[in-house]
Amino acid sequence: MVKKADVLEEETRRKEILEAALDCFLQFGYSKTSMDDIAKKANLSRPLLYLKFKNKEDLFTEIFNYLLEGRYESSEEVLKTNLSPKEKLIRISEILLIEPWSKVAGRPMTSDYYEACSRLSPKVMEKYEKFIIKSVQTILGDKESAEIFFLAMDGMSADVPTVKTLRRRMEILIGKFV
């Protein structure tokens, strides 16, 4: 029987590994980061790292999933509230775009990380895009507007802005839609 403390310890260790890997990818880029670099940063052996993640691509995908953990559920809760459409869009953009961006922005290889997400985690990226479009469609009322909103939102981080700049851009975009 697995003890609750063991499960919590395992989850804490997983998060430490993912944070260490994210730090390495943002510092050196995907192609220059090795599993050895990640193992050293996470203070564990490379064989142990391979027991937890089959390869670097698998680990990278798990980081993307980790950055989105709980965000879909939080966004769905926002959709159920009595907030105005503008407030719902602000809160959902904060949850799904700005908060994750705050973990990667301002690092040497942020741009590389951003590009690698699309290339290495297409299924996770597709789920993310569909979820945002569906959520925005619920608020705005039609799919075409939701798709345009998503494309504009996605483009706002292409030049790797600061979190403050990204937040301001989102406020302007939301103001144009509602």
Image (cartoon, rainbow, N blue to C red):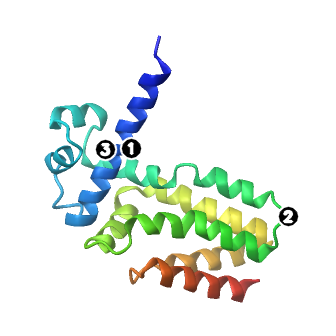
* Residue in the picture at 20% in, 37% down: 44
* Residue in the picture at 20% in, 49% down: 41
Which residue lies under the disc numbered 1? Answer: 15
The label shown at residue 123 is none
Q: Is residue 148 left or right of residue 55?
A: right
The label shown at residue 17 is 3
* Residue in the picture at 23% in, 65% down: 27
Q: CA distance from mark 2 to mark 1?
A: 34 Å
> In the rendered structure, which amino acid carries the disc numbered 3?
Ile
Number of marks in picture: 3
Q: Depth check: 144 or 105 in front?
A: 105
> Mark 3 packing: few (<14 Cα in 10 Å), some, or many (20+)?
many
Q: Earlier in the sequence, mark 2 or mark 1?
A: 1
Mark 3 and mark 1 in contact? Answer it, CB < 8 Å. Answer: yes
Q: Is residue 126 left or right of residue 12?
A: right
The location of residue 87, given as percent across then percent down, is 74, 73
**Residue 97 position (above or below residue 67):** below
> Mark 1 packing: few (<14 Cα in 10 Å), some, or many (20+)?
some
Q: CA distance from mark 3 to mark 2?
A: 39 Å
The location of residue 112, given as percent across then percent down, is 29, 70
> Mark 2 packing: few (<14 Cα in 10 Å), some, or many (20+)?
few
Which residue lies under the disc numbered 2? Answer: 82
Secondary element at tag 1? helix
Question: Is residue 32 in sight in this rendering?
Answer: yes
Secondary element at tag 2? loop
> In the rendered structure, which amino acid carries the disc numbered 1?
Lys
Q: Quadrant of residue 141?
A: bottom right
> In the rendered structure, which amino acid carries the disc numbered 2?
Asn
Q: Is residue 157 left or right of residue 33?
A: right
Considering every residue shown, the one lying at the far top of the view is 1
Q: CA distance from mark 3 to mark 1?
A: 5 Å
The location of residue 149, given as percent across then percent down, is 64, 78
